Amino acid sequence: MDSQALRSKQDDAKLHIVLFPWLAFGHMIPYLELAKLVAQRGHHVSFVSTPRNIDRLPKLPPNLTPFISFVKIPLPHVPNLPENAEATTDLPENKVPFLKQAYNLLEEGITGFLDAAAPDWVLHDFTAYWLVPIATKLGIACGFLSIFTASALCFFNPSGQDHRTEPEDFTVAPKWVPFPSRVAFRYFEVVKIFNNAIAGDASGTSDMHRFEACLRGCDLLAVRSCTELEPEWLRLLEQLYQKPVVPVGQLPPILPHGGDDDEDETWLEIKGWLDKQAGGSVVYVAFGSEAKPNQTELTEIALGLEQSELPFFWALKLKRGPCDIEVIQLPEGFEERTKGRGVVCTSWAPQLKILSHPSICGFLSHSGWTSVVEALQLERPLILLTFLADQGLNASFLREKKMGCLIPRNEEDGSFTREAVARSLRLVVVEEGDKFYRDKAKEMRAVFGDRDRQNQYVDTLVSCLKEHRRHVHKAARAN
Ligand SMILES: *[C@@H]1O[C@H](CO)[C@@H](O)[C@H](O)[C@H]1NC(C)=O
Ligand SMILES: *[C@@H]1O[C@H](CO)[C@@H](O)[C@H](O)[C@H]1NC(C)=O
């Protein structure tokens, strides 16, 4: 066989790729979107998680089931981790370090699986910082698949020797960013996470350390990002780490094309209400599967919505799992006073379907990237209010790119007022003088909703995985 024929034979070869996301739905869902896109190209994907998480994932389209295997590794028990808690959504925030501890103990299970399955690649999340040496030993190429934007990744220290020791140090762009940028935490955000994320949590390791170990150790860095959005940050990342950086696109979910599952009771009821509202009039409010406002925040958000006089649909999480004891309540009389104009839904709500509904005019969101992608793919302008501190980098990036309006807060303690909530909402969705955010959302649809571009990103990823697998194997043989 001549070398060209050999090459094309290798190009046709099918890959086996293992995906190992962190135990949070905001991570598992985009990993699953990528799994589907890779499987559509005839490659095999093994999606590894714990049993209860896999059981809660959305169903696969039947044509892809032969290409995606779900691998269930039971979550080892650790003290202080509540029974049946397998994802961050099952737990109050202060118990998440115990989930990380249990996740570390998946090491034995996944090593056994990798050893037996001998895949070409394992693409893992920031929490699996211990996986790199294991995969290397087994001769399996290792990629860090980051659902964090490139701008957020550039915030971590490429040299491992951090000069930043105080919370204030994290409120400005780090010194290795060569261009002017305001992508950084706000003071109140970093203070909230400082101890756990930077100094180390109950699992014995800090998130900072996890990220840095993944960034430095991996053979390839795959980022949920695109060159249309943050070319300067993708380039910087490549310079900082001197390894292939591959944007994989924003992984927008496939949009529901109305009428396909009319038997879904919850949706029919919600749709019934939305259908009665005027086109482009309703604010959708939701803070993701994890974030839960504290009582002060809840009161200000509710009274702000009331003051805005806008119709709203609010998907509100009142509890993080059965062991959450921090009770929060809507202000007295709120539901009575907003009756007819607003709905508060405290059970699960089909976000993508709601966002697709023509009555929706904007999205008050926590700035989790999955929500951001869903909103921008549908041209819905964003009003942002962060809860978990690590959402702060997303929010400051969106502010820098003028893609979302942050509700003004006190920089020291993060407090905000109902007036600020009402004003920001009206600014983005009604005021004529400030069509700015609506125009920007239109412009962004081309970036976030373009399936052809998304497909090109996945094609590029697959060829990089083929190409670099050869390098990794060659290097392994040389050792
Ligand atoms: C951004 O959004 C993602 C996805 O929701 C979330 O997991 C992450 O914590 C946020 N923050 C950063 C810095 O990317
Ligand atoms: C609730 O969160 C706000 C920041 O949004 C903070 O200022 C306030 O102290 C918190 N309240 C409680 C009771 O934790």
Image (cartoon, rainbow, N blue to C red):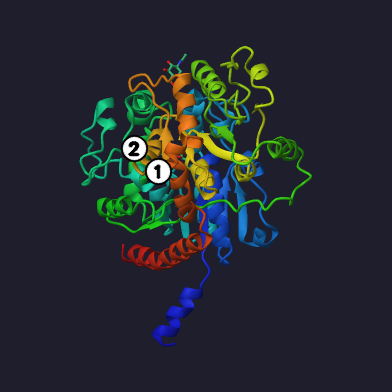
Q: Where is residue 319 in the image (x, y as percent from the top left)?
A: 60, 23
What is the crowding at mark 2: few (fewer than 14 residues within 10 Å), some, or many (at least 20)? Answer: many
Check contact, mark 1 vs mark 2: CB within 8 A. yes
Q: Where is residue 424 in the image (x, y as percent from the top left)?
A: 45, 29
Q: Is residue 118 above or below residue 56?
A: below
Residue for point 69% across, 26% down: 340
Q: Position of residue 144 (x, y in %)?
A: 41, 50
Q: In this view, does 172 lie above or below 326?
A: below
The one nearer the camera, 105 or 314, is: 314
> Where the N terminus falls, by quadrant?
bottom left
Q: Position of residue 225 (x, y in %)?
A: 42, 52
Which residue is denoted by mark 2 in the rendering? 209
Which residue is denoted by mark 1 in the rendering? 129
Ligand 2 quadrant in view: top left
- From this viewpoint, which residue is outermost toward the bottom? 2
Residue for point 67% across, 50% down: 59
Location of residue 268 (image quadrant): top right
On screen, residue 289 versus residue 443, left or right, reads right
